[in-house]
Amino acid sequence: MKARISIWLATQGYRFAGVVAYPALPFVYRVRARKGKEERDRRAERFGRASVARPAGPLVWVHSASVGETLAVAPMMEKIAALGIHVLLTTGTVTSAKLAAERFGDQVIHQYVPFDVPRAVARFLDYWRPDVAINVESEIWPTTMAQLSKRNIPQIFVNGRISDRSYARWLKRRDLARSLFSQITSVLAQSDLDGERFRDLGAMRVSVTGNLKVDRDPPSADEAVLARLRAEIGDRPVWAGISTFEGEEKAVANVHRVLKSRVPGLLTVIVPRHPERCDQLAALFEAKGLNVIRRSEGKAITPETDILLGDTMGEMGLYLRLARIAFVGRSLTATGGQNPLEPAMLGIAIISGPNVQNFQEAYQRLRAAGAARTADTVEQLARNVYQLFTAEKARDDMVVAGYRTVEVMRGALAETMKHLDRHLSPLVLEARLSARRALQGGGVASADADRDSSVHGRMRASR
């Protein structure tokens, strides 16, 4: 009884906070917009008001937090759309919205995710009426989950993951966690460890399907730009610090200074996770006496260039293709780690710091195969970079091991689609019927009325 009261108070408190906070959200939005974190002309979407028409027929709602998650589930969404089912993608960042427009065009509908408050979520669900809600990885939004449950809309987590930190926090509120996680219809987890954590926190149906990020193609690059930069660099040895966080750029620059005299012609590429910090970083490097060129300025790389500062978005494939060795950031002075699979796909020897909790399984596999090394300090990072530049066979062995590890890890997309089939099959039939009615002149209203009485009944029964 005490646990039930505690859960009720927590959920009602969260709901009440959302109601109270609602009038202040326009102000919060304006502040975020001034910082470039929101699009001013799409404000209504964050309050659940659609900016485009809902198409007739079945619709699957996919929510991914940002760019990495969106790229991971892009092939899945394309497969769902190819079945004739409409796909609505929501994200929370400006960069992910831009990616959605460039990657999908009209194939996928994009909206910003509504604030997790009752009025915005209800307005969003009333309009879009999704048949299935798919959440990517581990975002828990209590109001949204409660409203989906109330409407008997299946909630599926794909590429499910729970970090060490999140798991520890949920364990302190185990009763609340179980009340929330038990609302999830199905979890398709990245790894055995993630699956165990979801079960422990209350998820009832959990399957391990693998990491969808492995089934992606490696990030692309403009071939003409790549050829030009390679011509400017010539045969200089190049290494990169990618997805770096505060403190790691300084560490990478210090490694460059230490190795500059020992590795003749050394060029270092630094790609911060947040490009808006590049003004500060450029000044920092120049104060250390380093010659810096910013990618956004389009200047040629010269023999005097020490650092190419990657201050552009969407060009990770370009930066990685220039390098032989990559330090993957958010792992030395920051925690959590960043995705090491992209450099492995592109034939790059990988080094990281010790703090890679968010990509535990990937790093475990890469390290076990000899495809990745760990550096606990800046001195160890410099030592590893030097060894890999001077021991070509060791570097080549790491590259081959990386390719093989990625191939072994593939298959998550096929497994995910197999598990989604029980939810998608009824929608495929309804999509065909809806298309047939449209051709016969049945119209949108007729199609929607029929689907409300047929598909939702089947979906609720299957849940």
Image (spheres, rainbow, N blue to C red):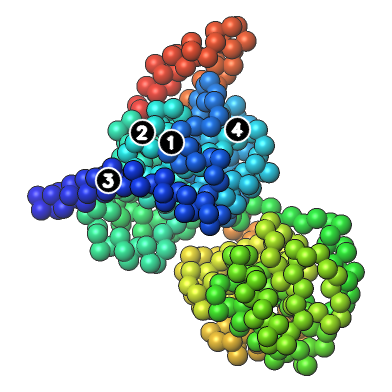
Mark pair 3, 1: CA separation? 17 Å
Q: Residues within 10 Å of mark 4 (few under 14, many from 20)?
A: some
Mark pair 1, 2: CA separation? 8 Å
Q: Secondary structure at mark 1?
A: loop
Q: Is residue 277 above or below residue 418?
A: below
Give whichever of discs 4 and 3 has the lower sequence position: 3
**Nearer the camera: disc 3 or disc 1:** 3
Front-most of residues 446 and 312: 312
**Nearer the camera: disc 4 or disc 3:** 3
Residue position marked by numbered label 2 in the rendering? 122
Circle on res. 20: 3
Asked whether disc 1 touches disc 2, contact meaning CB atoms under 8 Å apart, the reply is yes
Circle on res. 81: 4
Mark pair 2, 3: CA separation? 16 Å
Give whichever of discs 3 and 1 has the lower sequence position: 3
Front-most of residues 386 and 333: 333
Give whichever of discs 2 and 3 has the lower sequence position: 3
Q: Quadrant of residue 115?
A: top left
Residue name at image x 48 percent, y 72 percent: 335
- Horizontally, residue 142 falls left or right of residue 383, namely left
What is the x, y in percent for residue 336? 48, 69
Asked whether disc 2 touches disc 3, contact meaning CB atoms under 8 Å apart, the reply is no
Residue position marked by numbered label 1 in the rendering? 48
Q: Residues within 10 Å of mark 1 (few under 14, many from 20)?
A: many
